[in-house]
Amino acid sequence: MDFSALELPKKDQRNREQRRTEKGTPPSASLVLHSYSLVVPSRLLSFIPQAAMANAASGIAVDDLCKLKFLELKAKRTYRFIVFKIEEQQKQVVVEKLGDPTESYENFTASLPVDECRYAVYDFDFVTEENCQKSRIFFIAWSPDTSRVRSKMIYASSKDRFKRELDGIQVELQATDPSEIGLDVFNSRAR
């Protein structure tokens, strides 16, 4: 990097030269390197596309089918759950499994692999204390301890970007073993 184009204000140059001559060091004998930081005004950040900034962390894209199926779950309630996986060769999040509305919570937990990371969305129905039927959409970041470290890192760095694509998530859970996504946890977090 060429620092010759950077100029210090005249006042700063005089002060440095005065300090050097007071110490007995001629100005030409010492070289002082300074670190300069680049400050980008916030008004310039608006020119960078939001998707480009959000995707910069992991480089993982989101398949349009993921958004479409989530909208069907949210609006039409055509699915009980959706399991998503990251295809590392394609570098995108894709739908792995769709759970019919009649499928149970046990079917959902059985669809999460024991030694691989996944994202999942679960439509949880419950009854309030006032005896009202309600529903909450849970986002689950499934990252078991036995999964590969690289996989955990990719899923962790892509999670926020993916979550932003799924507009309407009400509760988020991060789980490393089945006890962290038990029905009791769903009940307590839904209320």
Image: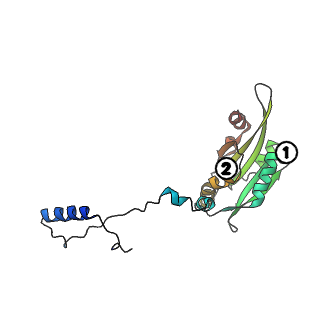
**Which is more toward the observer, 125 or 115?**
125
Count of picture labels: 2
For image coordinates 69% across by 33% down, the residue present is 188
Quarter assignment of residue 47: bottom right
Q: Position of residue 118 (x, y in %)?
A: 70, 54
Sequence-wise, the earlier of marks 2 and 1 is 1
Secondary structure of the residue carrying numbered label 1: loop
Decide if residue 146 is in sight here: no
* Three-letter amino acid code at the position of disc 1: Glu
Q: Which residue is mark 2?
A: 141
The answer to whether 172 is drawn above or below residue 2 in the figure is above
Q: Position of residue 49 (x, y in %)?
A: 61, 61
**Which is more toward the observer, 46 or 35?**
46
* Three-letter amino acid code at the position of disc 2: Ala
For image coordinates 72% across by 43% down, the residue present is 138
Q: In the rendered image, which quarter contains the N terminus?
A: bottom left
